[in-house]
Image: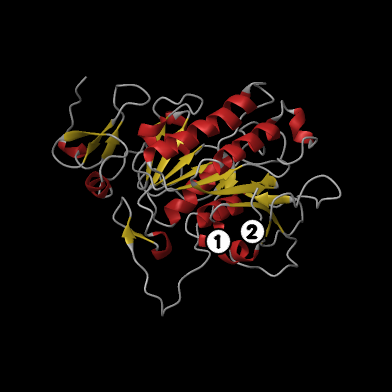
Amino acid sequence: MSAVISQAHVGRGVLPDQGGMNASRRVCSGPAAVPRAHGSSQVQQQSRRSMIHWSRTTGPQPVSSYSGSSYPGDYSGSPYPGDMGQEARGYNEELPSDAEVVPLGRSQDGGQISGRFGSIASAAVAGATGGCGRAVVARLVAEGVPVLALVRDYTKAANSLPGRDRDVDIRQVDVTQMMGLPEALRGQDALIIATGSRPALDPLGPFNVDYQGTVNLIEAAKAAGVKKVVLVTSVGTDEPFFPLNLLWGVLFWKKRAEEALQRSGLDYTIVRPGGLVDAPRGNRVMGGVVMAGPSTYGLPPKQQPGSILRSRVADVCVEALVEEAASNRVVEITQGDGTQPVLNIAQLFRQTRPQYM
């Protein structure tokens, strides 16, 4: 079905195609619309950065608080990772000094990518409409990094994702099906996986989404030449008797997904947050991020995991893309009570014991 594009629409952005969820969309960057597929050649990547992407709204979207589930899926209930809702924030944790010479890239809307992220031409976020996923998208946009948002519901993403009017490209996929995933990830330098099941609603979700869906994304990333994968799971994945496993073994299957990533040969960082919140509860003061090696938090005699803002989880995930000390690491994170010294994320990665699991 051909589309009639008036002069007013020239250069406005991406129009949804009529070919289904995995079809290419059309980009208006001049007098005519030309087909575009995700992840093509380097020349095409350079070209697409100058295009303004389609949005249902105009003007920049403010970074604000997102509400939603507090579990590693997107259902309401338990306060654990990988899901919906987030107080998104976008600031640079570690700015270069005036004496440093840093390379600058250019984002899709013509803005500059911050020097520390200049090596990332584009980053994909799986589970981008969940709480942690949206916070990750917001942080990447703040850094000027072009984002490919992999989502289950295109309409929901188009109406809710921060930065969708400039640096965010949306693609609807089903992570439980391998078909289409390698094509979607082709041309991406990095992949952040923030997907999660709804075990309270779907007993097969932990296996299908938390395990098989993650394995599919890992295999697709290998096939597409992705250089770095960051996976958000949860504290407690090392403990079979952790209470969350009552939900159809959700942490058991997250642990199997972690093992699949560690065996993949890809450069990885596995981030295990404590309980997820959008904002401090009550009068609680939330300090800086506290980072530790695997199996630090959990049931007694281990330390109590506590909670962490989803925005801070996003900070850790994005920092892991460029911090050398985050390479092939498993870290557990929570937030302090404000009495601990505040270190930036890069320093935390460098000081955390390098235990590999």
Which residue occupies the extreme top position in the image? 1
Where residue 143 appears, as percent x and y from the top left, is 43, 57
Name the mark on residue 99.
Answer: none
Question: The residue under label 2 is which amino acid type?
Answer: Pro
- The residue positioned 63% from the left and 41% from the top of the image is 233
Report if the CB atoms under discs 1 and 2 are less than 8 Å apart: yes
User: Is residue 21 shown above or below 48?
Assistant: above
Q: Is residue 189 left or right of residue 321?
A: left
Residue 315, quarter of the rendered image: bottom right
Name the residue carrying label 1: 325
Q: Examine the rendering and report whether any part of residue 83 can be seen.
A: no
How much space separates mark 1 and mark 2, taking CA atoms? 9 Å
Where residue 314 appears, as percent x and y from the top left, is 55, 51
Name the residue carrying label 2: 354
Disc 2, SS: loop
Where residue 324 appears, as percent x and y from the top left, is 51, 61
Question: The residue under label 1 is which amino acid type?
Answer: Ala
Residue 82, quarter of the rendered image: top right
Which residue occupies the extreme left position in the image? 31
Which residue occupies the extreme right position in the image? 301
Where residue 284 appears, as percent x and y from the top left, is 76, 56
Residue toward you, 6 or 322: 322
- The residue positioned 30% from the left and 51% from the top of the image is 109
